[in-house]
């Protein structure tokens, strides 16, 4: 199975969009393109032609350039079936468990509601790459604008079960602020302290802190660990339903 070339493109204040290129076929996709100019600039620099847009959810900082890019390139827009009415220009709508051929590569689609009702994630197993939009961030997760804690916990739990070396290409540079919150709950957690030191060094060098990995998030992300007795004790909910623990942690983050 073909391995993808992946380019991370910072846009707006703290967004990342991604260009993925499958070299044997030449297909190229923009994942969650907020704006068009940076996409065109990167395509030109690489000598690539845009053939697809892959969306995770409907928010404007993820679909804002859909129509402009489609008008300029004729690309095919692929997004979530559960939210197809809010994905501008959508051509192909996919649901949980669907497999999508991208040249010689293949993506598996996960329905991951919580941040929005129709959010999906794209997992390219052959490239050990997960494009999860705003469901998971490094040491964080998305706000629950349209879903419940139970939904989001189920969604994150499914992604958490992917292979440990899977790289998490999330859509925002929120890691430093997420760490400040996580340390307010677990100030002595070794994995979190190690990640904090790493992130401080990266940001001082003006480098991105993502992608992360499933392994790293299992160790230090409080939103991955609502069933961990250590995290449960830290929030005074030992033995509680993990979805309730998750909801408590998310509520604390919203007020932080």
Image: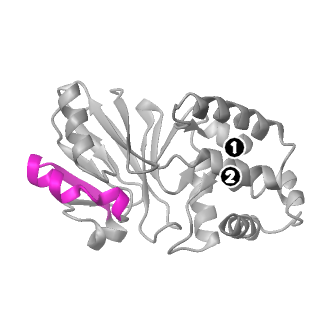
Q: Secondary structure at mark 2?
A: helix
- Looking at the image, which residue is at 38% across and 65% down? 59
Q: Position of residue 230 (x, y in %)?
A: 87, 51
Numbered circles on residues, count: 2
Q: Which residue is mark 2?
A: 224
Compared to 227, does 9 lie above or below?
A: above
Q: Position of residue 81 (x, y in %)?
A: 32, 66
Q: Nearer the viewer, residue 156 or 69?
A: 69
- Looking at the image, which residue is at 48% across and 33% down? 128
For marks 2 and 1, give the CA distance: 6 Å
How many residues crowd around disc 1 within 10 Å: few (fewer than 14), some, or many (20 or more)? Answer: some
- Drawn side of residue 235 relative to residue 40, left or right: right
Q: Are marks 2 and 1 in contact (CB under 8 Å)?
A: yes
Q: Which residue is mark 1?
A: 218
- Looking at the image, which residue is at 73% across and 64% down? 249
How many residues crowd around disc 2 within 10 Å: few (fewer than 14), some, or many (20 or more)? Answer: many
């Amino acid at each position: 199975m073909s391995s993808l070339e992946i380019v991370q493109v910072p846009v707006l204040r703290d967004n990342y969009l991604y260009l993925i290129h499958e070299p044997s076929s030449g297909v190229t996709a923009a994942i969650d393109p907020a704006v068009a100019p940076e996409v065109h600039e990167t395509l030109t620099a690489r000598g690539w032609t845009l053939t697809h847009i892959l969306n995770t959810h409907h928010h404007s900082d993820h679909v804002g350039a859909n129509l402009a890019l489609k008008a300029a390139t004729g690309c095919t827009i692929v997004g979530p079936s559960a939210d197809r009415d809010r994905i501008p220009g959508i051509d192909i709508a996919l649901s949980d468990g669907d497999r999508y051929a991208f040249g010689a590569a293949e993506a598996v689609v996960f329905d991951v509601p919580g941040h929005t009702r129709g959010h999906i994630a794209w997992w390219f197993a052959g490239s050990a790459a997960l494009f999860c939009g705003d469901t998971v961030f490094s040491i964080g997760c998305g706000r629950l604008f349209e879903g419940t804690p139970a939904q989001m916990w189920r969604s994150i739990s499914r992604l958490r079960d992917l292979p440990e070396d899977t790289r998490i290409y999330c859509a925002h540079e929120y890691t430093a602020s997420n760490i400040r919150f996580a340390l307010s709950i677990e100030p002595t957690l070794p994995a979190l302290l190690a990640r904090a030191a790493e992130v401080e060094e990266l940001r001082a060098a003006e480098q991105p802190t993502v992608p992360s990995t499933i392994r790293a998030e299992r160790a230090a992300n409080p939103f991955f660990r609502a069933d961990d007795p250590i995290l449960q004790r830290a929030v005074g909910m030992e033995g509680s339903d993990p979805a309730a623990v998750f909801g408590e942690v998310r509520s604390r983050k919203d007020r932080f």
